[in-house]
Amino acid sequence: MGKVIIGIVTKHYSKNSLRPDMYIRDEIKQAVFDNGAVAIGILLPKDEKVDVEDDWVNNLSQEEYKSLITQINLCDGIIFQGGGACDSYEMVVAKYCYDNDIPALGICCGQNVMVRALGGTTYEISNPEKHNQITEQYVHNIYINPSSKFYDIVKCKTLMVNSRHTKTVDRTPLLEKVAICDDGYADVVESRNKKFYMAVRFHPESLYKIDENMNNIFKYFIKVCND
């Protein structure tokens, strides 16, 4: 049996660049490889970046959409990266994963993507000076619902995490908030009805080499993708 293939949804550096690039963060692809899977990129099949917020729309042509779905169907699971903005095509991927029960993991901005894809909303947090800590390994605790899938991964009710974000989840009609930080923000959301549709606000890819719980997120995700 071949290795699990994980598609990492690429992001644009800047839509204002004369020669824009799409990227995958080294930490994320390495966490995939180090846990025995293969990482490939999911690419936007057009050269126009469209930044969106909660009110996104699918702006792909029929042919572009088919090209995107062809890429997704090469994969056993999908990861949505962190970053400053969301492109509308990321929401198209997230919605397709949900509708077709393809395992999906969102990280930081990837949580925005997965929430928005299903009709949810986000808002700016009131204390970004605390939660946008670029260099700190650990910033705050999260408190985990013991009946959640996320609890099955980490096996603990509280967990210290890093924190590099300025937004959080507001309304999320199809996902459940299963881990809350000490400021009341949702750090983990998940679907109980899917094989694996989960998004975290922190960055496990930055800690997986030194923190077993963070590595277990990738390990469990890849295991589900292999089932």
Image (spheres, rainbow, N blue to C red):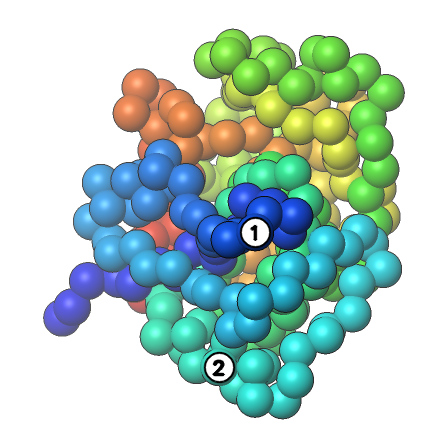
Question: Dot 2: few (<14), some (14–19), or many (≥20) neighbours within 10 Å?
Answer: some
Q: Residue at the location (51% across, 53% down)?
A: 19
Left or right of 182 in this view: 66: left
Residue 67 is labelled as 2
Left or right of 203 in this view: 32: left
Viewport quadrant of the C terminus: bottom left
Identify which amino acid the numbered label 2 is placed on: Ser
Left or right of 138 in this view: 74: left
- Residue 180 visible in the snapshot: no
Query: Looking at the picture, how far across and down is residue 68, in whole percent?
Result: 51, 76
Q: Quadrant of residue 134?
A: top right
Q: Residue at the location (56% across, 40% down)?
A: 82
**Helix or strand or loop: what does disc 2 sit on?**
helix
Q: Is residue 175 above or below residue 143?
A: below
Pick whichever, 27 or 120, lies toward us.
Answer: 27
Task: Of the two numbered discs 1 and 2 on the same chain, state the one appearing first in sequence.
Answer: 1
**Helix or strand or loop: what does disc 1 sit on?**
loop
Identify which amino acid the numbered label 1 is placed on: Leu
Count all numbered tags in the image, as a single digit: 2
Viewport quadrant of the N terminus: bottom left
- Residue 96 visible in the snapshot: yes
Query: Looking at the picture, how far across and down is residue 225, in whole percent?
Result: 36, 61
